[in-house]
Amino acid sequence: MLSLKLKFDLHRDVVSDLLRKEASVCRVKEYSGEVDTRILNIERDGGILYSWKGATGTTRIGKFDPVTRNNKLLYTFDKQVCVSSCSLNKDETLLAVSLAQNTRGGERLKPISKCLTLLIEIHPINNTKVLKAVDCRVKVQFLHQDSSRSVLESHLLLLTEDGYVDLYHVLLTKQEGYRVVMANPDRLSKTAERIVEDLCWVQWDGHTQRLYYITHKERFLLRCVQFHPAHNCETVLELPLELPANPFHTVKFANLGFDHYHTERAEKEVVRMHIFTNRIGSMCVCYSQPAGDKQELIYTVVLVHKDCSKKFRVSLGGDEPLQKASPLHPLFIPIGYYVVVYLRGYFLHCINTRQQEMLCHSLFLSGHGVGPVLRGQSDVLTVLHAESEPGGRVLDLAAGTIHTAELSSAYLLQILQSNTSPRCPSSWTDPQRLAALHCLLVYMGNDPNLELKIIEWLCDNVNTFQTFDQIQEFILASLYRISFEKSLGLDKVLPYSSVFEKKELPASLLEVPGVFCTSESHIESVIKGKTRSLQGFWSELQWNTDRTRNLDAGPNPRFRSSHTAADWNKARSEMRPSSHHLEENTKKVLSMVDTWCLDKKLVPLFQEEDHQQRALIGLTVDRLREHLNRHLPRLGKKKIDSLVVNYVAKLLELIRHMLESVWLKHRLGPRVLSLTQQGSPAEWSVFHFMSRILESVQSLCLPLPPGYHTMLAVFAVRCLPRHAFLQYVDHGFLQLTETFVSRLMTDLDNSDANERLKFSILKRLPQPMERRIYHMWDHPVSSASISRDYVKTLLEKHDKNKGVQCTGRDKPGFRPEFLPLTHVARILSDIEEQALNPFEEQENVDARFVEETALKQTLILLGFEEK
């Protein structure tokens, strides 16, 4: 499920280089000693600080640059020391270190502090200043802020196990043009500013320069301190948390380097916590509780941007006690807008933090083979997080490796493509397939090759699953992804999944075997600070939280396309033409589609007038615009109009893309549009796929591209028996468009079978279309129909204009002995002389022809001749 890509290997990138340098110092070909290299910290720029023991036995500190892939020596101690914490300022002029007491031999009897914190000048190596000498652990961390101010100052955080945080402001000065030294080292202690007290847990986020910490008085309270470029800071967030009693035995440090001389066993951790943010304005607070005596694990994900929290209880199965070698806490790994909860050997839960309402949109996998395989065998892995990176980074401290964790598209496709036939049942459930499909479409959907594989899967698996329609999911999820990229505020109001359209949800979509979930709304998060000072992430988080609360307070915030069905059915039953503003909506959409499709003419869509689909396009735009204006007025009418038109245009383009992909898959050419040939098995597959698209789209009451019904009818004539084709028409599945019928009348010859088909189709046409079609069919019956309509039209005009007088002139061919016919022919002849023949442009109809046709019809009616 997770694919791991190696980004850093301590032995490959550092140790091998150190061995070469040590060999050079010792003047030997190959250094055979050990260098005992240990990772100390990872700074904001990705630089990795490490320590090692050289050939002289002294401790050294170096930095690995991930961009240049080079190693740099920063400082060398005069003896072997135990570096428990280390940080380097942005300009690489100051090095802060915390040294743990060396307990070897008799040194532990000396009356020295357990931890000594130093500030060292390293550009060049010069003075060393003692900042603290205390009997508790101390973590050091420089601020790395982007600022246009002078670089001759640095700011250092000291975080202690006693539960407080100090901020040191270090002024620097240049000497001799290049030496950077502390301006007044004796006054450093006076510059210290205490910014936090009484904390029991703390996490540093170097990429965003935020400090998260938990305090406890009456209840546990999570706070966040934001450091600004001007080197000031403020508390911007408060969030109450429901934690067990005494969750931390000692102060827990997260993302503040790696102390190799003080490690806490995973089994002794009561709570493991991590906080992840995304620059688009989302925040997740994740923490887990130990399984204890029960065969279950409890973990909570607080979605601050969604104003809710999710508490999960996962059964680990079996009656035997848990394996002692397994960690009792899972890893929380951020990947995009997913949070992956992974407990090695038991389960992997990929939680969708954007669409969290239903469990079926989050993928849960259990078993031994669902997680990543790391080279190291360490039970304690560390997750490194950066907002700028889509995947999470996993550090295996024992192996000295850093991997980037990403979701495996191949694994997700395997979930979809597994055999679903009754003879070969698959172990994957419908909720797992639904979650995998959404992950592929929404999170990874920008990959055109991946999208093509999904369309091929849809074509090969056209039958719907028991609980969801995969074609509907493809359409709605793809449109959601495209629209969300245009505006981040649409995730709560746009259609995301067809399961929301169901009146009654299947039970299997509401629950996952072995997983019990409880949700809590209104988590009482408070974003502090004045509105003007809230910028960037905090402004987006504030808006996302407020918008979620407002939308949850109202009914039906998510648009459902099926709600337009009532208006659409009423418009169709009344057969009224679409209004002017609906037609303007349609023109905007089709003009945008035309712009996109100038170079894509493989599938002949958008090349004819389809009045029904044009009306539905306009109606869909209108209803979606009303919905967004009602729920997201902040976007503004102009932007909403653009979003809505783009949404419907992308819908039509998406369907065209689906057909074009299948067209290319089966290598169809222009011949498939000919009505004179029998369809091939490949064309039958395309017809079946098009039929499923039609069924899925119609049930959602969404429009189709103009020309779709014509293409489907052409494939139906080629692939279906004639009686089956007519049944499809009678049940309303196939629509007889004027383009299709006119082509059928002209392309098919007048053989007996084709005549029967044409007559059957003519009987099923509305009368206005039937009259137009007769003009295109070269057949005696067509000629008779044209004559009857012509006579009827002239007589109707005669009834309206009774003032017309017969001229009485003799006309050749009149039969005076048959007075009724003579009278009718004379009237027609006189009317014809006074008015233009409306049929002359299409057919040559003269009075002699009409006379003979009328005489023939009269004799038939009187019984003198048979029809």
Image (cartoon, grey):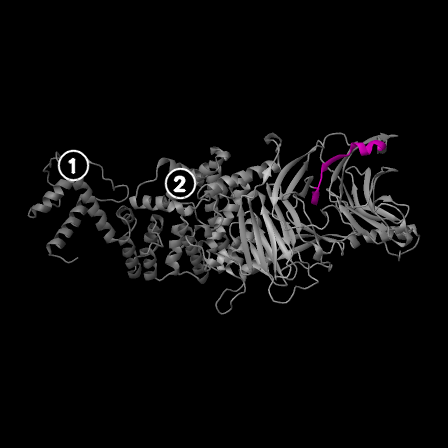
Q: Nearer the viewer, residue 220 or 682?
A: 220
Q: Position of residue 788 (x, y in %)?
A: 20, 47
Residue ID at (40%, 56%): 715
As drawn, which residue projects farthest toward the bottom? 423
Task: Name the residue carrying label 2.
Answer: 618
Give the x, y percent position of residue 644. Answer: 46, 40
Q: Which residue is mark 1?
A: 800
Q: Nearer the viewer, residue 277 or 572?
A: 277
Of labels 2 and 1, the one closer to you: 2
Furthest residue in direction left, as rendered: 817
Q: State yes or no: residue 163 in magenta.
A: no
Which disc number belongs to residue 736?
none
Answer left or right for 842 relative to 88.
left
**Which secondary structure, mark 1?**
helix
The span from disc 2 to disc 1 (Cα, nearest Å) is 39 Å
At which x and y percent is residue 410? 60, 57
Q: Residue furthest front?
A: 218
Magenta segment range?
A: 185-206
x then y, percent, for residue 260 = 79, 52
Q: Where, by quadrant of the figure, is residue 170 drawn?
A: top right
